[in-house]
Amino acid sequence: MTEKRIGVCNLCEAICGLELTIEGRDVVSVRGNAADPLSRGHICPKGVAIADVYADPDRLRRPVRRVGEGADAGWQEISWDEAFDLVADNLARVIEEHGDDALGIYLGNPNAHSLGSMTHGTAMFKSFRTRNRYSATSVDQLPHQLVAHLMFGHQLFLPIPDIDRTSWFLVIGANPMASNGSLMTVPDFPQRVRDLRARGGRMVVLDPRRTETAKVADEHHFVRPGTDAWVLLAMLNVLTTETTPSVAAYVDGLDTVVDLVAGFTPERAEAMSGLPAEEVRRLAYALLAADAGVVYSRIGVSAGPWGTVCQWAVNCLNILSGNLDRVGGAMFTTPAIDAVGTGLIGRGHFDAWRSRVRGLPETAGELPVSALREEIETPGEGQVRAMLTVAGNPVLSTPDGARLDSALRGLDFMAAVDIYVNETTRHADVILPPTTALERDHYDVVFHLLAVRNTARFTPAVFAKDADQRHDWQIFREITLRTAARLTRKAPLKKRLVQRARLTASPTFLIGQLLRRGDSGVTLSKLRARPAGIDLGPLRAGQLPARLPARSKRVDLAPTLVVEDVARLAAVPAPMGDELLLIGRRHKQDCNSWMHNSERLTRGRPRHQLLMNPGDLASREISDGSRVRVTSRIGSVEVEVAASDDLMPGVVSLPHGYGHDKDGVLMSRSRDLPGVSINDLTDPELLDVSGNAALNGVPVSVSAC
């Protein structure tokens, strides 16, 4: 029997609503749900492919343990009880023998897209007292979260571009045409850009590559990787020296900002970035003159050497131009479940402890993942001897992945919560696979908080799970409770009882409770009655200072950490020589380091090549389409090169997430994808002050093979 079901694509931040045609246990077709108030019928190739994850023959459905060694290694299915006990026994053993910090935990990007992970995974994460906590955050958006904590008082109180009502939109180091937005949940971005232009607005893009977003912009300007900070600070210089800025009464630190940017002139920005000084001035005045303008930056900036300074400068530009908390400017959502106001996600903190080997500061309870490899390899008290990874593949997605791959082999024990054997989980002693998106209820706790329109949507599971499957929250519950039972040091009884009660309650029950705590009037029963979602209206202006999470109800324009980093920036000399700078890129068909075993997403023209400006190829006597060797401080890879005028001279680009079989071990892919991992070249010593990896702007050389 054929029937229609409402679903949701939670593979990326766009959280598009889906309409699925079902026959029995099979998905016959997937289309965008036109009734969804946020995505409005939009769907990208990943949304169509969500059924491929559910039906993927490579996907694990039952726990497996690794048996044998080397070429004889393989996987054996085991029962859930055996798997849970194996994990709990070994995690407890390592903690008892070597201390809390001997356990390392890594959370991958998909955790933010899973309701069970948000309600129960964080509880498991906190139940272990280790300081060796890591996640994909420190190869992505950590500067944004740190700046939000320092300026506004909470790491997720992030200003969102009001793209549906702005008239001037400056995009720096972001590619929402491919990403569907990031820290700006914006499904149907192509139509929203057309609407912007139809109402007389303009979009300007600064990027070292002519991206898909740059190609539909009104203007695109090349900017040398890693130098966005000079451009942004020069724009602030123009606003503070050539105009008389004013700020709201609840904003502190304007005088400090004026002094801080005094030496960052447009001419200095031109010398560093390649963007002409007159263009820097023109952009600053255009922002100031716009009826409603907003500046937005993303991973091309945050995953750079000065990501924190850049994101601070973006906020300052929006504030000094009068566009914070203003219609068409940088605004704040009012979601039905406010993860900021409810305390569901912590405020954040910085430098409460440091990593053992390099002394790197933690941010929001996590150490930079760039330190993980050395914390595994370096002997001594606090050495990481066991790992628990959840929905992550750091061998592909973090700096110097080849050395991390080697380090994982030396662990005493490793467990993974994942549906695949991949470059990372192949080192696990046991893998516990959860259900997938179509088999579990979903409510977006994080991405409703970051959306360009206020909406709420609860999506029941499309398919019931099999009796021998487990949801991720059930896995987290068992790992937490069984490991705690084996440790000699017990938490107080009251705390243990509260923890057990929270872990036993389902995510859906907890969502119902959180909705009742809000003042939106949305309840779980109302959401069940309207599965396409409830429209709560456009972003609301005039929320500040009342809604500021800072206890002072004030905005700090000049956090000490940023002031000190700008001083270091001022001493950086202008670039010299003809070295090439490596940047990443993403495609609409990709989802970070996963979805590469979906036939429908990997067909077509190859997307793995190194892109290089034709002039740079000619000067090195390299032929388009030939194989080249790309070398950074930490390693070399060989890959095909493709000439592209879309690259700024002096810049080369490899996509994120493409990997290859290592040591003859077959990865769980239905296709043999060509290419190499860019993170065999990225350098773990290149870090922003927040601890975020500087994945963009890595110095490399390129030569013919």
Image (cartoon, rainbow, N blue to C red):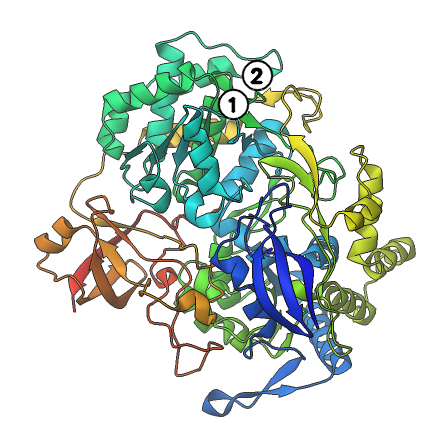
Cβ atoms under marks 1 and 2 closer than 8 Å: yes
Q: Name the amino acid, label 1.
A: Ala
Labelled disc at residue 541: none
Q: Position of residue 662 (x, y in %)?
A: 39, 77
**Residue placed under numbered mark 1 in the picture:** 558
Q: Earlier in the sequence, mark 1 or mark 2?
A: 2
Camera-side residue of 674 and 495: 674
In this image, 671 relative to 629: left or right?
right
Q: Position of residue 77 (x, y in %)?
A: 66, 86
Camera-side residue of 16 and 626: 16
Asked if 98 appears above or below 560 in the picture, the reply is below
Asked if 445 appears above or below 678 in the picture, the reply is above
Secondary structure beneath dot 1 equals loop
Camera-side residue of 418 and 561: 418
**Residue placed under numbered mark 2 in the picture:** 252
Q: Quadrant of residue 385?
A: bottom right
Kindly identify the residue that appears in the image at 14 percent across and 55 percent down: 617
Kindly identify the residue that appears in the image at 25 percent across and 32 percent down: 272
Q: Name the amino acid, label 2.
A: Asp
Q: Position of residue 204 (x, y in %)?
A: 36, 31
Asked whether residue 359 appears in the rendered view, the answer is: no
Q: Quadrant of residue 20?
A: bottom right
